[in-house]
Amino acid sequence: MNAKELGSKIRLLRTNLNINQTLFAEKIGITQSTLSSYEKGNATPSIEVLLAIATEFHVSVDWLLGISKSEIKISSVADVANFIFQMNDLNEIRYELEINDHLPNDLETEENKWYCAIKFFGNSEGHSCNQEICQILSGLEENRSSFESYFTSKEMFDLWKEKQLQYYADETLTEKQYPELDTATRMKLRNELLEKQFSSK
Protein backbone atom coordinates (compact mmCIF):
# COMPACT_ATOMS: atom_id res chain seq x y z
CA MET A 1 0.00 0.00 0.00
CA ASN A 2 1.38 3.41 -0.92
CA ALA A 3 1.40 6.51 1.30
CA LYS A 4 -1.63 8.09 -0.41
CA GLU A 5 -3.82 5.01 0.09
CA LEU A 6 -2.75 4.71 3.73
CA GLY A 7 -3.40 8.42 4.23
CA SER A 8 -6.88 8.02 2.76
CA LYS A 9 -7.61 5.19 5.22
CA ILE A 10 -6.50 7.33 8.17
CA ARG A 11 -8.59 10.27 6.95
CA LEU A 12 -11.61 7.98 6.42
CA LEU A 13 -11.27 6.63 9.96
CA ARG A 14 -10.98 10.12 11.45
CA THR A 15 -13.97 11.52 9.55
CA ASN A 16 -16.09 8.46 10.36
CA LEU A 17 -15.32 9.08 14.02
CA ASN A 18 -16.23 12.76 13.53
CA ILE A 19 -12.93 13.88 15.11
CA ASN A 20 -10.89 16.86 13.95
CA GLN A 21 -7.20 16.53 13.11
CA THR A 22 -6.02 18.19 16.31
CA LEU A 23 -7.88 15.80 18.64
CA PHE A 24 -7.05 12.71 16.56
CA ALA A 25 -3.35 13.63 16.55
CA GLU A 26 -3.36 14.34 20.28
CA LYS A 27 -4.85 10.93 21.05
CA ILE A 28 -2.04 9.11 19.21
CA GLY A 29 0.79 11.35 20.38
CA ILE A 30 1.69 13.23 17.21
CA THR A 31 1.25 16.80 15.99
CA GLN A 32 -1.63 18.00 13.85
CA SER A 33 0.78 18.92 11.05
CA THR A 34 2.27 15.40 11.07
CA LEU A 35 -1.22 13.90 10.84
CA SER A 36 -2.04 16.24 7.98
CA SER A 37 1.05 15.07 6.09
CA TYR A 38 -0.03 11.44 6.62
CA GLU A 39 -3.54 12.10 5.35
CA LYS A 40 -2.23 13.88 2.26
CA GLY A 41 0.12 11.00 1.51
CA ASN A 42 3.21 13.18 1.87
CA ALA A 43 4.64 10.99 4.65
CA THR A 44 4.21 7.41 5.85
CA PRO A 45 3.42 6.72 9.52
CA SER A 46 5.75 4.46 11.47
CA ILE A 47 4.70 1.07 12.81
CA GLU A 48 4.46 2.67 16.26
CA VAL A 49 1.99 5.28 14.96
CA LEU A 50 -0.09 2.63 13.18
CA LEU A 51 -0.23 0.58 16.38
CA ALA A 52 -1.24 3.70 18.32
CA ILE A 53 -4.09 4.36 15.86
CA ALA A 54 -5.23 0.73 16.02
CA THR A 55 -5.13 0.66 19.82
CA GLU A 56 -6.72 4.05 20.44
CA PHE A 57 -9.52 3.74 17.89
CA HIS A 58 -10.09 -0.05 18.03
CA VAL A 59 -9.37 -0.77 14.38
CA SER A 60 -7.33 -3.43 12.68
CA VAL A 61 -3.80 -2.66 11.47
CA ASP A 62 -4.58 -5.05 8.62
CA TRP A 63 -7.47 -2.77 7.62
CA LEU A 64 -5.26 0.32 7.75
CA LEU A 65 -2.72 -1.41 5.49
CA GLY A 66 -5.37 -2.69 3.08
CA ILE A 67 -4.77 -6.36 3.93
CA SER A 68 -8.25 -6.80 5.40
CA LYS A 69 -11.58 -5.25 4.36
CA SER A 70 -12.76 -5.31 7.97
CA GLU A 71 -12.12 -2.08 9.87
CA ILE A 72 -13.06 -3.53 13.25
CA LYS A 73 -10.67 -5.90 14.96
CA ILE A 74 -12.37 -8.41 17.26
CA SER A 75 -9.88 -10.78 18.86
CA SER A 76 -11.05 -10.96 22.48
CA VAL A 77 -14.22 -10.93 24.56
CA ALA A 78 -13.23 -7.40 25.62
CA ASP A 79 -13.45 -6.29 21.97
CA VAL A 80 -17.00 -7.69 21.77
CA ALA A 81 -17.92 -5.94 25.03
CA ASN A 82 -16.43 -2.68 23.77
CA PHE A 83 -18.51 -2.93 20.57
CA ILE A 84 -21.69 -3.50 22.63
CA PHE A 85 -20.81 -0.54 24.88
CA GLN A 86 -20.21 1.70 21.85
CA MET A 87 -23.60 0.75 20.37
CA ASN A 88 -25.19 1.83 23.65
CA ASP A 89 -23.73 5.32 23.19
CA LEU A 90 -25.29 5.95 19.76
CA ASN A 91 -28.27 8.22 19.17
CA GLU A 92 -29.74 6.41 16.16
CA ILE A 93 -29.66 2.88 17.60
CA ARG A 94 -31.34 1.46 20.68
CA TYR A 95 -31.24 -2.14 21.83
CA GLU A 96 -33.07 -3.82 24.69
CA LEU A 97 -31.59 -6.60 26.78
CA GLU A 98 -33.44 -9.77 27.70
CA ILE A 99 -31.76 -11.87 30.39
CA ASN A 100 -33.01 -15.31 31.38
CA ASP A 101 -30.84 -16.48 34.27
CA HIS A 102 -33.51 -17.58 36.78
CA LEU A 103 -33.48 -21.33 36.36
CA PRO A 104 -35.26 -23.61 38.85
CA ASN A 105 -32.58 -25.24 41.03
CA ASP A 106 -29.99 -23.57 38.75
CA LEU A 107 -30.54 -26.35 36.23
CA GLU A 108 -30.85 -25.68 32.52
CA THR A 109 -33.43 -27.73 30.63
CA GLU A 110 -34.53 -27.91 27.00
CA GLU A 111 -37.57 -25.80 27.91
CA ASN A 112 -35.76 -23.31 30.12
CA LYS A 113 -32.32 -22.29 28.91
CA TRP A 114 -29.91 -19.72 30.25
CA TYR A 115 -29.59 -16.99 27.65
CA CYS A 116 -29.05 -13.31 27.05
CA ALA A 117 -30.51 -11.54 24.02
CA ILE A 118 -29.94 -8.15 22.41
CA LYS A 119 -33.18 -6.99 20.77
CA PHE A 120 -33.62 -4.18 18.23
CA PHE A 121 -37.17 -2.96 17.64
CA GLY A 122 -37.52 -1.82 14.04
CA ASN A 123 -39.98 0.97 14.82
CA SER A 124 -38.24 2.23 17.96
CA GLU A 125 -39.21 5.89 18.25
CA GLY A 126 -36.28 8.27 17.97
CA HIS A 127 -33.85 5.59 16.80
CA SER A 128 -33.85 5.95 13.05
CA CYS A 129 -31.37 3.18 12.21
CA ASN A 130 -33.06 0.36 14.15
CA GLN A 131 -35.03 -0.55 11.04
CA GLU A 132 -31.81 -1.01 9.04
CA ILE A 133 -30.30 -3.14 11.82
CA CYS A 134 -33.39 -5.38 11.75
CA GLN A 135 -33.14 -5.72 7.97
CA ILE A 136 -29.45 -6.66 8.20
CA LEU A 137 -30.11 -9.24 10.92
CA SER A 138 -33.03 -10.71 9.00
CA GLY A 139 -30.83 -11.05 5.93
CA LEU A 140 -28.03 -12.53 8.00
CA GLU A 141 -30.35 -15.19 9.41
CA GLU A 142 -31.43 -16.21 5.92
CA ASN A 143 -27.95 -16.15 4.35
CA ARG A 144 -26.15 -17.76 7.28
CA SER A 145 -28.72 -20.56 7.39
CA SER A 146 -28.30 -21.13 3.65
CA PHE A 147 -24.50 -21.21 3.99
CA GLU A 148 -24.47 -23.49 7.05
CA SER A 149 -26.91 -25.85 5.32
CA TYR A 150 -24.55 -26.07 2.29
CA PHE A 151 -27.07 -24.50 -0.10
CA THR A 152 -24.73 -21.59 -0.88
CA SER A 153 -20.96 -21.25 -1.01
CA LYS A 154 -18.72 -19.23 1.28
CA GLU A 155 -18.03 -16.93 -1.67
CA MET A 156 -21.74 -16.16 -1.99
CA PHE A 157 -22.08 -15.60 1.76
CA ASP A 158 -19.07 -13.26 1.74
CA LEU A 159 -20.47 -11.43 -1.30
CA TRP A 160 -23.77 -10.84 0.51
CA LYS A 161 -21.89 -9.44 3.53
CA GLU A 162 -19.77 -7.18 1.31
CA LYS A 163 -22.88 -5.81 -0.42
CA GLN A 164 -24.46 -5.00 2.95
CA LEU A 165 -21.34 -3.15 4.07
CA GLN A 166 -21.26 -1.13 0.86
CA TYR A 167 -24.97 -0.35 0.94
CA TYR A 168 -24.98 0.94 4.52
CA ALA A 169 -21.56 2.65 4.45
CA ASP A 170 -23.11 6.13 4.24
CA GLU A 171 -25.52 5.58 7.15
CA THR A 172 -23.53 7.57 9.68
CA LEU A 173 -24.18 7.47 13.42
CA THR A 174 -23.63 10.03 16.16
CA GLU A 175 -22.64 9.62 19.80
CA LYS A 176 -24.86 10.61 22.68
CA GLN A 177 -23.75 13.56 24.76
CA TYR A 178 -24.35 12.70 28.40
CA PRO A 179 -24.84 15.70 30.71
CA GLU A 180 -22.79 16.00 33.88
CA LEU A 181 -25.32 15.77 36.71
CA ASP A 182 -24.75 16.54 40.37
CA THR A 183 -26.23 14.15 42.92
CA ALA A 184 -29.25 16.31 43.74
CA THR A 185 -30.24 16.73 40.08
CA ARG A 186 -29.71 13.03 39.37
CA MET A 187 -31.90 12.04 42.34
CA LYS A 188 -34.60 14.50 41.29
CA LEU A 189 -34.66 13.11 37.75
CA ARG A 190 -34.67 9.54 39.05
CA ASN A 191 -37.66 10.26 41.31
CA GLU A 192 -39.53 11.90 38.42
CA LEU A 193 -38.87 8.87 36.23
CA LEU A 194 -40.01 6.44 38.92
CA GLU A 195 -43.16 8.46 39.52
CA LYS A 196 -43.91 8.47 35.81
CA GLN A 197 -43.37 4.70 35.55
CA PHE A 198 -45.59 3.89 38.52
CA SER A 199 -48.36 6.28 37.46
CA SER A 200 -48.52 4.64 34.01
CA LYS A 201 -49.22 1.19 35.53
Image (cartoon, rainbow, N blue to C red):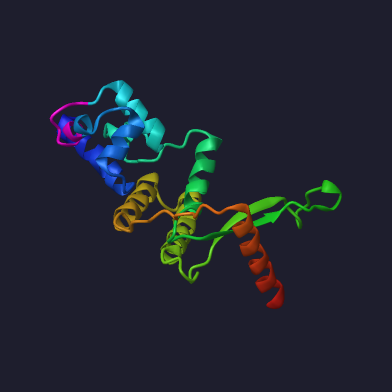
Q: Is 107 left or right of 154, judged from the image as shown?
A: right
Can the viewer see residue 97?
no
120 or 107: nearer the viewer: 120
Q: Is residue 19 above or below residue 39?
A: below
Q: In the image as oriented, which residue stretches furthest toward the bottom?
A: 200
Q: Residue 66 placed where, x, y %? A: 26, 34
Q: Residue 183 placed where, x, y %? A: 62, 53
Magenta span of residues: 36-44
181 or 32: nearer the viewer: 181
Q: In the image as oriented, which residue stretches furthest toward the right?
A: 105
At x 27% / y 44%, what residue is drawn? 20
Can the viewer see residue 13?
yes
At x 52% / y 47%, what residue is drawn? 85
Quarter of the figure that contains the N terminus:
top left
Q: Is 45 left or right of 75, judged from the image as shown?
A: left
Q: Residue 119 placed where, x, y %? A: 56, 60
Q: Residue 165 placed where, x, y %? A: 34, 52
At x 25% / y 29%, what residue is drawn? 31
